[in-house]
């Protein structure tokens, strides 16, 4: 375990925890004394039929998705019981940063998206006794978890809303994300994951932030200086004040754990590599919602998958914020996302 | 100066050299005993009106562009006198790797695209006595030099063919290329440019190759496993056998010198930052030819510039090889490029 004030409840909100015990992982290892951190909004009704599950993206925590919850919003906590499960590696659920030896830091086992979803299934069924979710939704790695839910437990997912993510990681996305991991590892202070403190890996975190600045947005974003929308006045200020400021407080092993999981996402593991068969299992009404200009998940990759999902609609959301449209940096992106969620929940 | 067998005439062909003497640079320094390496094909006719200038891309040498020259090709050496000038930093023209102290290695001065073009102008006018070029063409950084020629010496350029490049580097391309430089510099062996041998910086060269693999092609290329077209049978083989094999023999300072020059390319330096005014100077018949899926020079960026060039045509060449369509890995790309050059030379 390693001290890092970033992953504190003071900073990122209180969590509840489901103790998972010794948790068997898809890759064969067992995660000792595993835990799943989560937050909830609203109340589960007597019929237990008003639940929404909203897993979060890479590098985030349950709190990250709360910008979408509100009484005037489609994710209305006066109507729905909204569960925000943390993913393994997020610093609150079992993670390299909070797991004791011998599975600490660089020795933390490799986790798959399916491991997260199995843990979340225990939360949903054992803790809450829910049999069907009105909606599973998520962005980026949250979309990967959404697809995993819809394929693994089709009878439990009534509606699915994967934003800017894929059911099976493409080869380009795979090498893209691996390059980000390697940027962190390039810092000699990383030391195979056994560093003296998260902050000692500052050079690696900065290199990693630089790659995100290049690949996380899109050319037109920079050409139009869209960063002015959030108050920056020069490109350099944006690179340090946004990208470096976001990543520097984080734990490199946590980021690497989640990135590895990201690039190994693949629902066709359920069907011997047959993606058509895997996506064909989905019974949820599904809105596939890529973001225009997304360099991680180009809309064409999402369209290919949408075409394989029986009851799906392909709904492109165009934004110069590209992959980061989900941050709702402007009112337009927020409205577009909400409008689609409203349509889906009404269906 | 540093030993590197890659930059030998045995390896990359014999060159002729124009001694430039002490060469004043745009950024104020003087490059001592500068030299411009070049190769030619065909013969200059008596009227000196059959010359074509074909500068090369980043990381290349004059030899790189010879795949476009042939008696059955638009660049026919039985008809045209084709000059292939080397750019500063290419290992044959003055470069960090071949310049003696005190301007050697990490102390080599910053060079601008305009410096290359001024040196090439001396070659064209002083050595060959040419007053007008039938065509200036180039790919990527060669396109940057083409634009610089057309803006700086409009009366000398009858036709211009910039492939997959821009007249003014966009902000995204700037941070993109800087990230590549930083990958080289991330290797402690780089040592501010004063390494013991080029090959000592192997880790940096490998990181750099990795970023190129991600950003140099496009998602669809990897999804369709287009690398099979050139004989690779796995993705990993392609990453090492193509990307690493290409870059590992090269000199890191040379690559950094050219990359810095690339990202500072800007013809609007001639017009106080007014790109419309700069491109408005061009009198050449110009074919602006971006490559589809190019992540460095998205077609939309090239279209914006084409619209500012008086006598231009925008001709998109679509290829899964994206930025690397110019390598003509398949017959289709070669035919598309040749067809456009034939049209332009006939106009």
Image (cartoon, coloured by chain):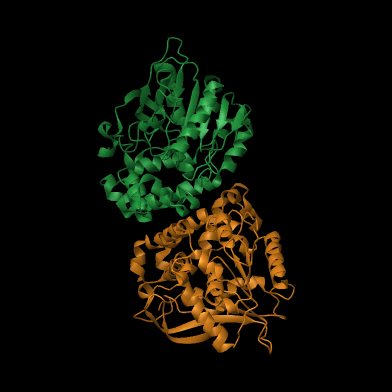
Chain colours: A orange, B green
Quarter of the image where one finds residue B347: top right
Percent coordinates x, y for residue B114 in the rendering = 48, 31
Residue B108 falls in which quadrant of the image?
Answer: top left
Camera-side residue of A315 and B172: A315
Q: Residue at x 62, y 28 (%)?
A: B280
Front residue of B257 and B293: B293
Q: Is residue A301 above or below residue B145?
A: below
Quarter of the image for residue B89 reads top left
Position of residue B313 measured from the top left corner of the image (x, y, whole percent):
60, 31
Judge whether residue B148 can be spotted in this image.
Answer: no
Side of B66 where A40 appears, left or right: right
Residue that sits furthest to the bottom in the current view: A46
Q: Is residue B133 above or below residue A53?
A: above
The image shows residue B64, relative to residue A274, as above or below, that is: above
Q: Nearer the viewer, residue A214 or A251?
A: A214
Report whether residue B123 is seen: yes
- Residue A248 in percent (x, y) is at 48, 65
Whether residue B139 sits left or right of residue B21 in the image: it is right
């Amino acid at each position: 375990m390693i001290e890092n004030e970033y992953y504190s409840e003071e900073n990122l909100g209180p969590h509840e925890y489901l103790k998972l015990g010794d948790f068997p992982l898809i890759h064969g290892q067992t995660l000792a004394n595993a835990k799943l951190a989560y937050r909830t909004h609203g109340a589960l009704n007597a019929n237990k039929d008003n639940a929404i599950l909203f897993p979060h993206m890479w590098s985030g925590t349950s709190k990250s998705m709360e910008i979408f919850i509100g009484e005037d919003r489609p994710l209305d906590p006066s109507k729905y019981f909204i569960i925000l499960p943390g993913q393994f590696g997020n610093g609150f659920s079992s993670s390299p940063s909070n797991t004791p030896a011998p599975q600490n830091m660089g020795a933390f086992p490799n986790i798959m998206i399916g491991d997260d979803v199995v843990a979340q299934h225990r939360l949903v069924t054992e803790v809450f006794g829910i049999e069907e979710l009105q909606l599973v939704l998520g962005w980026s790695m949250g979309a990967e978890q959404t697809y995993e839910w819809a394929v693994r437990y089709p009878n439990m997912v009534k509606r699915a809303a994967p934003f800017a993510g894929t059911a099976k990681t493409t080869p380009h996305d795979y090498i893209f994300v691996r390059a980000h991991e390697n940027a962190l590892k390039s810092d000699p202070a990383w030391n195979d994951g056994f560093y003296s403190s998260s902050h000692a890996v500052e050079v690696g975190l900065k290199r990693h932030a630089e790659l995100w600045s290049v690949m996380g947005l899109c050319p037109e974003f920079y050409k139009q200086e869209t960063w002015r929308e959030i108050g920056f006045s020069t490109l350099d200020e944006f690179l340090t004040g946004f990208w470096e400021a976001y990543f520097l407080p984080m734990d490199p092993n946590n980021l690497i754990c989640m990135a590895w999981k990201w690039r190994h996402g693949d629902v066709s593991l359920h069907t011997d590599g047959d993606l058509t068969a895997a996506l064909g299992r989905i019974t949820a009404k599904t809105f596939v919602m890529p973001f225009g200009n997304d360099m991680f998940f180009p809309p064409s990759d999402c369209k290919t998958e949408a075409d394989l999902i029986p009851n799906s609609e392909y709904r492109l959301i165009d934004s110069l914020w590209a992959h980061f449209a989900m941050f709702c940096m402007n009112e337009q992106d927020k409205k577009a996302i909400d409008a689609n969620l409203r349509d889906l929940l009404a269906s």
